[in-house]
Image: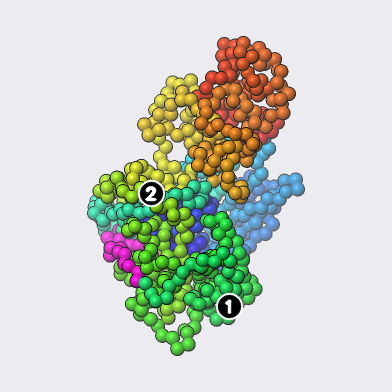
Amino acid sequence: MKSNSTHHIHQTTRAALITSVALALLLPAGLAGASSSTATSAATFVSSTTSSAQTTATTDKADPTKVKITKEEAIAKVKELFPALKEATASSVELGSSTSYPPLPNQMAWTIQWQYRVGNSTYGFSSTVDANNGDLINTYISMPLQENASYYPPELSQAQALKKVEAFIVKAVPSIKSSDLQLDETSLYNINNAALFGPVQYNFIYKLLKNGIPSAAEGLQVTIDGSGNVLQFYKMTNGFNYPAAKPTMTQAEADKKFTDSFEVALYYIPIYKNGMMNNWIMGWRPVEQALYSVDAVTGKRIDNEGADSTSPMTYADVPQSKKVFRLRSTSTELSAEEAAKLVEQVAFIPAGRKLLSKSLSDDYQTPGRKIWRLTWSEGNNFYGGTAQSTAEVDALTGQILTFQAEQLNYPEVTKAQAAPTGGKKITQAEAKLKSLELVNLLYDKASSELKLVQYGGDWNVVPGGTGYRYQFIRYYKGIPVSDGNVNITLDLYGRLQDYSIYRNTGLEKIAQVPADATVTKQEALAIYKSQYKMQLQYTQIGGFTMNNTYATPSVKLTYTPVLMDSGKSLEVLDAVTGKWVSYYPIIALQGTPITATDLKGHWAEKELSELVKYNVLTPEADGKVNPEQEITVGDWLTMIAKATTPNYTSYYNGNERKAVAGVNLENPYYEAVNFAAEHGWISKDVVLQTESKLTREQLAVQLTSFLKYNKISAFMDKDATVSQFSDNASIINKGAVAVAVKLGLLQADNGKFNPQQIVTKALAASVIMKLVELQGKTDQTIGQ
């Protein structure tokens, strides 16, 4: 995955990716692809910012004569570890992987493709086993859920699941000593990322100790279900030689260096919702260099490429050139050839490559914005390692959004390009002038909106000395725009090799942000300093592509600033309100949960506690849940949506987002209402009063719809269960009440149903837990 080295978001992105590679899919491209400073979480070993092909210094050749573990032994081991695979078929087994590009780092590994048939359906997944030592490297099993099964309460508690996982690791990875594993309890996202309905799963992340010191570049992740079946295993290793665990810098010296050099700055920060930019805030956040690691041997601060980073970062104006780019004002879209010509006029496309692929489609961040995606190649094969150049061009404005002279910038694919006829190598000073000229030709109003980021030292020289790179950041009313970067890379002859902008949408909304900060810099500095600690660890340097240039990986012994609460990795301090704001909400990355303080002894303590544990209910800052607080219709829909699908706010069916059940997009309950309507819990045609208090009778109706018992409800309209209530005459939806009572979800009180009584959080929690326990006891699946 390519990185744009997105400014000011580096330091928090990697901590957001510690849970699994799949989590990166939840992030917008600028977040998921940002090349983070290694100064983040201590559990960053599962990071999609680093390609698996780039995490090792050397790649072993796949030589079948050198294996110590045969493919039969590898298959047998996986089947022994995963009983669910006993009925599966190993459809293909190969040494290394011919289907992965770039090549996997460990080619001396058996890649096993499994097929599992259920009726007429076939399920496929893969495993990888080290052919030298027999270590399981990875397996992800995705079996079909058992229809209408009981999942709660689980057979195993979290503590019991942990013991089973530890026993599994001993068998799966014989090369690792149990003493070299350290459970990262701050990364236990098993509850934060789990649904109350459906299979219970526990996820455990381990840091690998090297010389007794945690490595942020290696570790294990294991997922096990509530029945004790291991579903996922991932071992992240890098094959590096680790330096000795002998820091010359003391912990006290590292702490002092952090305190003395830590710096925050004010930025306009985009706030995302459902994967899309929603609005902006003005917030304080650490500057990029503040969270760089410190080399524990030299005592110098180093950037994510391992280079000395002691020089302060500054900004310089962008002078306007004679030739500047202006957005097209016509409503007629460019043709593919016209878009390609715009690229070819300013960028370097190696000789022999022709425009062989062109597609017009929506921008991933701005539906309705049409983007030409262009590929120049020497042959008709655009995949499997063919050298190619790519670009993205706004079909309406003509703005070039991205360009890569070499899309797959790996030694296996690329080759040195010939010098231009009559060309000569340019100096760094000349390259800077060239970058300023190009940014004017590529970016509208570059001189008034952008500033050149100056890192100092030799940062502008591409690692390996193959070219020059420059980074620009957008400014608005004297304040930098976080994620508003423009990146340019030139080769030694001044030819444009790489260009990218992080295309913020909704920039016009910045004008709505209050202009005056109420939180001072000193206050923000003190707040942020208290959030971090300096940790001695092994840190991977490099191993990623920045500005389309691969940085060679290595491991260093460092003191690294890490968040004491990893859940704050995607939060920022609002400079106006003084509150922490999640700028990209991900339920798996919530901070340390607040302990509930008002549940002890309550009649629904157990049920309420379970909903708090699963983040269906969140205590206030003072720890109060307020169990007797009355809830609204919108509150109920939110609770049941969270219980079934924790990330329901990310649900998007591909349709145009518009008002649902009379609830518009600005309504705070819109996401829950939209989710409920899509799943048939409510009708899209009704006019829902989300702010009205929820009555017991309304809850009965909601439960009937949730369970898909609407027809049974109509049939039971005259059921004797309801007629026995003394307040029967005041019940309108008698069938729904009958269903809820017969299933034990709601009960009478002294012979009354009390249909107009308002539902409290406690009652809602009790009902939800009864629904969870009802799984497997009805004729259809509940809540999944």
Q: Name the residue under label 2.
A: 513
Q: Give the label on residue 275, or none.
A: none
Q: Would residue 201 be visible to someone looking at this image?
A: no
Query: Which numbered disc, 2 or 1, marks the residue that appears first in the sequence?
Result: 1
Instruction: Point out residue 134 in the picture as x, y percentages from the top left corner.
Output: 55, 56
Among the 4 quarters of the image, the one containing residue 373: bottom right
Residue 659, compared with residue 75, is above or below; it is above
Q: What element carries label 2?
A: loop
Q: Give the label on residue 353, or none.
A: 1
Among the 4 quarters of the image, the one containing residue 261: bottom left
Residue at 30% x, 64% y: name it: 314
Q: Look at the image and give the residue range highlighted in magenta.
A: 295-319
Does the stretch in magenta take in 296?
yes
Residue at 66% x, 44% y: name it: 144
Quadrant where the C terminus sits is top right
Residue at 47% x, 29% y: name it: 609
Frontmost residue, 439 versus 598? 439
Residue 381, compared with residue 636, is above or below; it is below
Q: Would residue 280 be visible to someone looking at this image?
A: yes
